[in-house]
Amino acid sequence: MQLLTKAQKAKMIKNYKNQDGTKEFKAVVKLFNPTGQGSWYLSELNPDTNVAFGLCKISDEEFGYVDLNELTSFKGQMGLSIERDRWFIPTNFSDLKLA
């Protein structure tokens, strides 16, 4: 499974290009580790570096950057890869944060 659909990728790149340091975009996609910890709610993507921005939930939750190349190459238990939640609906970050 691809981590991003073409539409998601285009929206995330558009958000990246429109970011001025003050805007908060909705999370466009949710990626997760199907056999362990790790969920990434991503809103922006730098097309030059393939680095995305969003809310990262591993042991704690924090906003940060994640290299999609690293997520693509990750192999967890039983050799399973990071997956995209196909039923995720774009959501405000404030609705995703626990704290």
Image: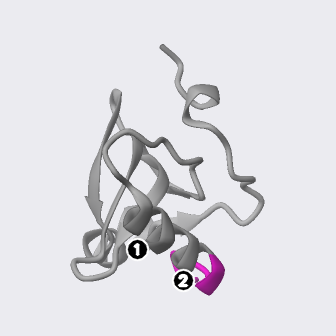
Rounded to the nearest angstrom, the CA distance separating label 2 from label 1 is 16 Å
Q: Secondary structure at mark 2?
A: loop
- In percent of width and height, residue 29 lies at 58, 60
Q: For the residue marked with disc 2, what is the amino acid?
A: Gln
**Looking at the rendering, which quadrant does residue 16 occupy?**
bottom left
Residue 27, given in percent of the width and then of the height, sits at: 57, 50
Residue 6 counted in the magenta span: yes
Task: Give the class, few, some or many, for how many residues have Cα within 10 Å of label 1's Cα (few <14, many ≥20).
Answer: few
- SS for tag 1? helix
Residue 75 image position (x, y, % from top left): 34, 71
Percent across and percent down for residue 7 are: 64, 80
Question: Any mark on residue 79, and which?
Answer: 1
Counting labels gives 2
Mark 2–mark 1 CB contact (< 8 Å)? no
Residue in front for this viewpoint, 15 or 42:
15
In the displayed structure, 7 sits above or below 21; it is below
Dominant SS in magenta: loop
**From what the image shows, is residue 66 above or below residue 98?**
below
Q: Residue at x 54, y 67 (%)?
A: 83
User: Image height check: is 52 above or below 14?
Assistant: above
Q: Amino acid at mark 1?
A: Gly
- Left or right: residue 52 compared with residue 3: left
Q: Nearer the viewer, residue 55 or 14?
A: 14
Compare marks 2 and 1 and give the one earlier in the sequence. 2
Using the image, tell me which numbered label, if any, was put on residue 2: 2
Q: What segment is highlighted magenta in the picture?
A: 1-7
The part of the image, by quadrant, that contains residue 67 is: bottom left
